[in-house]
Amino acid sequence: MTKADIVDKVAMGTGLTKLETEAIIEGFFKTVIESLKEGKGIEIRGFGSYKVKKKNARHARNPKTGDQVEVPEHYVPTFKFSKDFKLLVNKGMLDSETMK
């Protein structure tokens, strides 16, 4: 599913225009990115949480050449799904398998 597909589904479900819906979704994405850039986590109950994790510097190996390279310290955004989210997805997948 692409961002355009999400915009279409949300627009149909809310009665908003696609243009309004796209602005809302873009606003959500920008808010998440800006919050994470500031080091703030986001928790959406029943959905999941966004956080930033620090990765320490380390030695790695280039798989093509075998040369050792230094990977500097860096930060990565992470998302952890809520327990409810996982249960709903699992139930949906199991139900769709029994329908086949």
Image: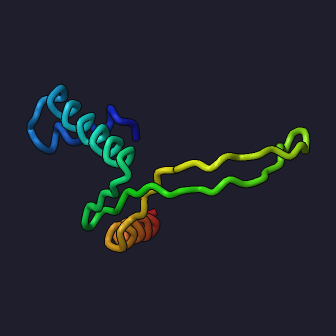
- On screen, residue 52 versus residue 70, left or right, reads left
What color scheme is it?
A: rainbow
Say which residue appears at 33% left-offset and 54% top-offset: 40
- On screen, residue 8 versus residue 48, left or right, reads left
| Residue 10 image offset from top left, x and y in percent | 20, 42
* Nearer the observer, 20 or 39: 39
* Nearer the observer, 99 or 77: 77
Say which residue appears at 78% left-offset and 53% top-offset: 59
- On screen, residue 77 versus residue 26, left or right, reads right
- Quarter-of-image position of residue 55: bottom right
| Residue 26 image offset from top left, x and y in percent | 27, 34
Residue at the extreme left: 15
* Nearer the observer, 99 or 35: 35
Residue at the extreme right: 66
In the picture shown, does residue 53 fall above or below 4? below
| Residue 78 image offset from top left, x and y in percent | 46, 55
In the picture shown, does residue 78 fall above or below 6? below
Say which residue appears at 43% left-offset and 70% top-offset: 94
* Nearer the observer, 71 or 22: 71
Say which residue appears at 30% left-offset and 37% top-offset: 30
- Quarter-of-image position of residue 89: bottom left
